[in-house]
Structure formats: C-alpha cells, structure tokens
Amino acid sequence: MYTSHEDIGYDFEDDPKDKKTLKSHPNIDSGWAWMVVLSSFFVHILIMGSQMALGVLNVEWLEEFHQSRGLTAWVSSLSMGITLIVGPFIGLFINTCGCRGTAIIGGLVNSLGWVLSAYAANVHYLFITFGVTAGLGSGMAYLPAVVMVGRYFQKRRALAQGLSTTGTGFGTFLMTLLLKHLCAEYGWRDAMFIQGAVSLNLCVCGALLRPLAARGDPEGPGGEAPARPPGPGPGPGPGPGAAGPEEQAGEPRGALGVLKTAGRLGRRVRKGFRDWSSGYFGTASLFTNRRFVAFILWALFAYSSFVIPFIHLPEIVHLYRLSEQNDVFPLTSIIAIVHILAKVILGVVADLPCIRVWNVFLMANFTLVLSIFILPLMHTYAGLAVICALIGFSSGYFSLMPVVTEDLVGIEHLANAYGIIICANGISALLGPPFAGWIYDITEKYDFSFYICGLLYMVGILFLLIQPCIQMIEQSRKKYLDGAHV
C-alpha cells in the first residue's frame, strides 16, 4: 500500500518540493495518465450513471412494496446522498490504504449492496443494503477516481476532469436502457443481481489507479516504486528457491511476525488519521471566508433540484400516460446526452478571455431553476423533452464547480474545500427526492414538489449573489483605505 503523499496528488500535499518532483514525472499529462482518465470515466458510468437511472427501479419498488412515494424515494436518495456525504471521510481510507486499495474495496462493497438488495423483503431492508451499503461503496470508489485524475494532470487538468466526468452522462443513458431492459426481461430483483455483477468492474477501474512515486521511476506505467520487496511471481525478483521477503529482511515469522505486522498496520492507521484530521480540521480558516460559506449554502439547496427529475420523471411519465413514447427514448436519457455536450460547451465558453467563469456559472443556475419551474406545466412528451434538454444543458455547470471553488479559496485549499462542497451536495441529494415524494403524498400532484424545490433553489442562488456583493464591498473598502493611506 502507499501513503497519502504518493497517492492522493499534489493538491493534498503541502511540500512544494513534492510538487516540483511530480511536475518532472514522465507520466504527468501523458502516458499512463490517460489510462487513469479512462478508469475515472468508467467509474462515473458505473456509479453516477447508475444512480441517475434509479428512477426505473423506483417505479418497480412502488409497485412491489406499496409504500408512499416519500418513503420509497429514501432508497435512491440515501444511495446518492451517502456517496457524496462520505467524501471527506473517505480521505481517511485513502491515507491508510491508498487510492487504488480504497477504490477496489469500494467496488466490492458496492457490488455487495446491489446483490443483497435483490433479496429485499421491504423498503426498510433496501435502506440498509442499497442506500447505505451500496452508497458507501460508491463513495469509496468515486473519490479516488476523481482525486487520481488531479494527481496525473497539471496543464491539462480541466480537460482531463471534463472528459472523465462525461461518464455521468453516458452512464445515465446506458444504465437507464440497461435497467429498463433487465427489469422487463428478468424482473427488478434479478436486474439488481446482474447490476451487482456489473459493478465488480469498479475493482478493475480501481486497479488502474496506479500511484505516482515521489520520484519518477520510468519503469512501468505510473512510474511507482515497489510497495514491498519483490516476491515470487512474474517479473523480476527472486527465483523459486530464493527466500521470501520476511527471511530476506531477517524478520520473525509465526505469531511474532503477525504481531509485528499488526503493529505496522496500527501505525499506518494512526498516521493516516493524523493526516486526514489535519487536512480538514486544520482548515478552519475556510469557514471564515464569507464567500465560501455562501457557496456551501448554495450547494445545500442546489443539487436536489437536479436529482429530483431523475428519480420522479419515470413515474410522472407513467401518470401522464406517456410510457410508450418514453420507452422509445427516455426523458432521463435526453438530460444525460445534453448534459455531456453542455459540459464541453460551457467549459469552452468559460475559458474565453472575455468571459468570466462566475457569470457563466450564474447564468446556468438561473436557466436550471427556470426549467424546474416550467416542468410541471408540460403534459406532453415533446414539451417535457424540451425542458429536459434545458435541464441537461444548464446542469453542465457542474464541470465549472472546481474552478469556481478555486477562485473562492485558492489552489492550496481546493481539495479540502471541494470535499466540503461535495458533502453539502450529498446532503441536498439525500433530502430532495423524499421531500418531493412527501409533497406528492399530501397534494397528490408533483406540481407543488417542483415549485417548492424551485423556490428553495432560488434561495440558494440568492446566496450565490451574496458573493459578488461582498466582492464589490471589499473592493470599495480597499479603494477607500488606499485613498486614505495616500
């Protein structure tokens, strides 16, 4: 296993010497770096794509268990929310096991959650197996995939992150079709069992996340130094008759060797906890940044309005008797495809010298909240398709979130600050869909669910508008102080 400075990336490091070393590494921005992008792309397909397609299973669970929409929606929202909420805490696993080990373990846990959910006897069982177990596994596999892309790229980081996150759109399109087909052919239980087997590919993706050594080693992809002395097996190392690593190092075997290994593991866990706690609890200055606090409050309101259509649209289509048209081309797939294009287009527009990233970010948010307000007014497939396209395009602002976060807190605090923003998004995703279902249970209409969520989103946007107001006040104060000083 590798320690945090080898694995997490220079955004998580404080030593400028390490940064300089990594810049000269032959795989930075080239070579194995693109395999890491490919791995992250498939992680987004398998995790985020599957979660955005959960509306298909939500309809099946409603018919199977005959529970309220608000209660049933907790299954999907728990999975989505926990995936993001645990982000800051997964850093503890990364510091102890490394990105690759954490991602592989996450793939196994995620697959286990899907398989156990196939035997659910009630909705409450799904809370544990799918909401908590699969959600935790998703978080353990998702964060390392994002972090390692930042580790391997410097000059082309925006491009690399943009390419990897397009997997969310592709995954939503593909997983929606896959789950619909599996549910129609085999039923939702077997569909979840098969999806559990598909999720084991997360372990393969995790294995591709080879860490960069602190000093570039040209041998092998990733240039990592060996984590332990080479033993028997393929590649260079001692032959069949040579002594094992313990005998070569003169280490004791048997019970004493087990105790010594346990002691090393304990020290690694303690060191990982110290690194993790100092990374988050040592950044209290982030919360003295009023603009960043306003950004956190926006994140608490915003993400739910994006995930609610994915969870409830399949049932809305069923209520409007548009299932036949939706089966030909699902509305959630329209959101997914346009979302892919929007990430690229908004990224290109935001990079123009005459355009401010913050203005693009605000305009996309206004478009999204407008779409949420208009969606309940549409009762035809064509009308819903147009609104879904607008939702997909405006939600492309997610690719700008790291840039906006960096503008607010600086590059040195980006990793920890972005972890906090993702956690806030997770809380929003956790509460949004059940809230919309609860409003339906009271009013027997989804209209008020979208209206209220749109209003809450507007509250979040008001917090965003605080940022430029604070900036103007600070600039005016600075000019006044400069003038007084002169």
Image: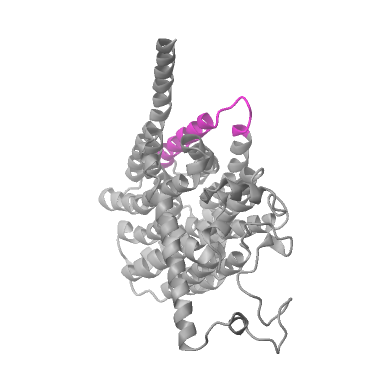
Quarter-of-image position of residue 273: bottom left
Q: Is residue 443 visible?
A: yes
Residue pictured at 34% horizontal, 51% vertical? 431
Above or below residue 10? Residue 121 is below
User: To which quarter of the image does residue 43 belong?
Assistant: bottom right
Q: Quadrant of the C terminus?
A: top left
- Colouring style: one colour
Which residues lie in the magenta part?
349-377
In percent of width and height, residue 35 lies at 68, 59
Q: Quadrant of residue 351?
A: top right
**Residue lying at the far front of the rendered structure:** 250
Relative height, residue 227 to residue 83 (above, below) = below
- Asked if the magenta segment contains residue 355, the reply would be yes
Most frequent secondary structure within the magenta stretch: helix
- Quick check: 66 left or right of 134? left
Q: Position of residue 153 (x, y in %)?
A: 64, 49
* Along the line of sight, the residue nearer the viewer: 297 or 99: 99
**Residue 80 in view in this figure:** no
Q: Where's the N terminus, which quadrant?
A: bottom right
Viewed as shown, does residue 348 lie left or right of 190?
A: right
**Position in image of residue 365 (x %, y %):** 46, 36
- Residue found at the very far left of the displayed protein: 442
What residue sits 47% from the left and 79% below the top? 260
Judge by depth and name the residue closer to the eye, 210 or 87: 210
**Residue 209 against residue 114 in the figure, above or below:** above
Does 384 appear in magenta? no
Q: Nearer the viewer, residue 275 or 146?
A: 275
Vertical order, 250 against 206 (above or below): below
